[in-house]
Image (cartoon, rainbow, N blue to C red):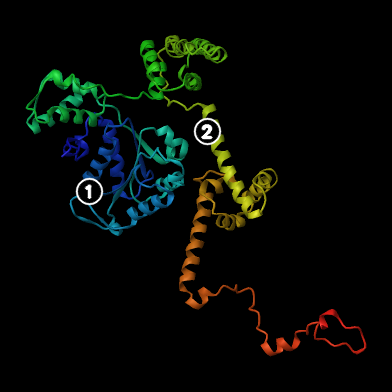
């Protein structure tokens, strides 16, 4: 059995390295004992391998809750999320110890959405709207597990106010080594102290990777030596932009900021946008702000020379100025403590691209119904349709039903957010109308369901066959004229 599963913590007390996060998670869970709390969902955020999923599962066991889990390998469309979430909230189930949990009697189930920051196109169509509805209306506790909370908040803005955010940090190497010693003792394997220290350091805060490295060295061995541990390669950890921003503005170590700046996988122009966006809030001293922008302007000059001269060696000078230079220019030790902001320019570009995509889909649907081109719809029809839909509530449900509008498309026409109450209300009415028609169709006798003639159009009465023959005029060839001496027609011959 895999050691990561064999020694997975069964309670929150066994989760290492994050006592503050564990206590916050436990406090939120206990708020459900008094009924449905104001905050129904928690977001666990942090690097991979720090114990987010393990903590969610341990919480369910500690509280005696059932667990319903969805991850990135599952289909996570709006319909699937609603089906599983509603099923988790209303259906009875069993806990891990086999006890029966009756939903009607208050039996809790923990709904876990792993990798909730990763929704991909049509594969997860409508997922963002369904998740927003879930965290707002769920009758059961919900946990969203993310690596990038800011990526999730860009897709679901309401997640900032409607959830409690709990950050899991990377455990220290010494803390990880203690846990690894307990695993080694349980398996009867002796590990040299220097070897254990190296295993913990190479994992770079990923406890799952550390356990697997120890298992790979201990298979078939009684002793793990330093020489064996030296054969392990250090874990390739991807530095993110938030770590770089913390090093530039808050570490006070220009060398560290420079090192992280060269390790990060980001375009220099993107790094410059991040620093430009956050410098006014991080550098509260006017002198720091002037010096910082002076270094940043020099970095911008080097980046412009890269484009004009096509010499990418200037990138290193630009990165030095925007990391080492900006960090060294901050002489005051003030730390505002606010969160780093996503660059406004990039946010507007991303939002504009999404709006253009939705507009194109809406124009195609309108063009299909109006039998015209999408270009004409965009130029002549769309502004009036948006004005009508925004002001006339009576047309929203028929239009959304006729055009099969997705939440984002309906929100575009109504000029509101996709997770707003007005949009969700219209979609609920559309769904109820569809269900009513299905039920009505199933309740009709087979003869009526096969009748293709609409009720509004009376059936045409059949003309008797004899009467039809009598009223039908005779062909010209058989008609006789009153004047017998008249010239015969060619057809008479």
What crowding class fits label 2: few (fewer than 14 Cα within 10 Å), some (14-19), or many (20 or more)? few
Q: Tell me the tag on residue 99.
A: none
Q: Is residue 162 above or below residue 212?
A: below
Q: Residue furthest front?
A: 493
Q: Secondary structure at mark 1?
A: loop
- Between label 1 and label 2, give the one nearer the viewer: 2
Residue 64, image x, y percentages? 22, 48
**Viewer-side residue, 34 vs 228:** 228
Q: CA distance from mark 1 to mark 2?
A: 43 Å
Report the quarter where the C terminus lies: bottom right
Q: Is residue 328 above or below residue 153?
A: above
**Viewer-side residue, 22 vs 145:** 145
Q: Which residue is mark 1?
A: 64
**Viewer-side residue, 390 vs 147:** 147
Q: Secondary structure at mark 2?
A: helix
Q: Residue at x 29, y 33 (%)?
A: 21
Q: Residue at x 17, y 25 (%)?
A: 177
Q: Which residue is mark 2?
A: 350
Residue 441, image x, y percentages? 49, 70
Q: Are marks 1 and 2 in contact (CB under 8 Å)?
A: no
Query: How many numbered marks does the figure carry?
Result: 2
Residue 192 placement, left or right of 463: left
Residue 319, image x, y percentages? 45, 14
Q: Residue at x 12, y 31 (%)?
A: 219
Q: Is residue 434 above or below residue 371?
A: below
Residue 396 placement, left or right of 85: right
């Amino acid at each position: 059995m895999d050691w990561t599963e064999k020694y997975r913590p069964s309670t929150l007390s066994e989760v290492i390295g994050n006592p503050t996060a564990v206590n916050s998670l436990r406090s939120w869970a206990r708020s459900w004992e008094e009924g449905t709390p104001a905050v129904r969902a928690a977001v666990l955020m942090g690097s991979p391998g720090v114990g987010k999923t393990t903590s969610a599962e341990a919480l369910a066991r500690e509280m005696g809750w059932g667990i319903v889990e969805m991850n990135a390998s599952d289909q996570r469309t709006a319909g699937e999320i609603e089906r599983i979430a509603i099923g988790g909230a209303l259906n009875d189930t069993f806990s891990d110890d086999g006890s029966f949990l009756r939903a009607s009697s208050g039996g809790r189930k923990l709904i876990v959405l792993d990798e909730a920051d990763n929704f991909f196109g049509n594969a997860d169509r409508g997922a963002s709207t369904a998740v927003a509805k879930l965290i707002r209306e769920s009758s059961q506790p919900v946990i969203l597990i993310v690596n990038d909370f800011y990526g999730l908040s860009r897709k679901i803005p309401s997640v900032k106010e409607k959830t409690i955010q709990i950050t899991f940090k990377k455990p220290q190497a010494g803390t990880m080594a203690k846990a690894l010693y307990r695993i080694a003792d349980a398996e009867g394997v002796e590990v040299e102290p220097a070897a254990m220290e190296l295993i913990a350091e190479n994992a770079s805060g990923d406890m799952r990777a550390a356990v697997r490295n120890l298992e790979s060295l201990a298979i078939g061995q009684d002793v793990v030596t330093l020489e064996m541990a030296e054969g392990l390669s250090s874990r390739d950890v991807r530095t993110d932009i938030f770590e770089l921003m913390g090093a530039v503005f808050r570490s006070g170590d220009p060398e560290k900021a420079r090192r992280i700046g060269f390790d990060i996988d980001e375009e220099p122009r993107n790094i410059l946008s991040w620093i430009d966006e956050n410098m006014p809030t991080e550098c509260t001293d006017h002198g720091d702000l002037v010096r910082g922008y002076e270094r940043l302007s020099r970095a911008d000059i080097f980046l412009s020379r890269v484009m004009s001269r096509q010499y990418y060696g200037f990138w290193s000078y630009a990165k030095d100025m925007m990391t080492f230079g900006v960090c060294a220019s901050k002489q005051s030790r003030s730390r505002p403590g606010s969160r780093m902001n996503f660059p406004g320019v990039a946010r507007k570009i991303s939002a504009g691209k999404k709006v253009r995509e939705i507009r194109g889909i809406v124009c195609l649907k309108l063009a299909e119904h109006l039998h015209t081109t999408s270009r004409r719809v965009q130029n002549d029809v769309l502004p009036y349709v948006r004005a009508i839909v925004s002001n006339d509530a009576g047309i929203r449900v028929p239009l959304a039903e006729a055009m099969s509008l997705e939440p984002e498309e309906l929100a575009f026409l109504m000029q509101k957010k996709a997770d707003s109450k007005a949009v969700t209300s219209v979609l609920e009415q559309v769904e109820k109308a569809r269900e009513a028609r299905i039920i009505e169709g199933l309740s009709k006798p087979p003869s009526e369901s096969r009748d293709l003639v609409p009720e509004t159009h009376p059936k045409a009465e059949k003309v008797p066959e004899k009467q039809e023959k009598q009223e039908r005029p005779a062909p010209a060839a058989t008609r006789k004229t009153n004047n017998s001496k008249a010239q015969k027609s060619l057809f008479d011959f």
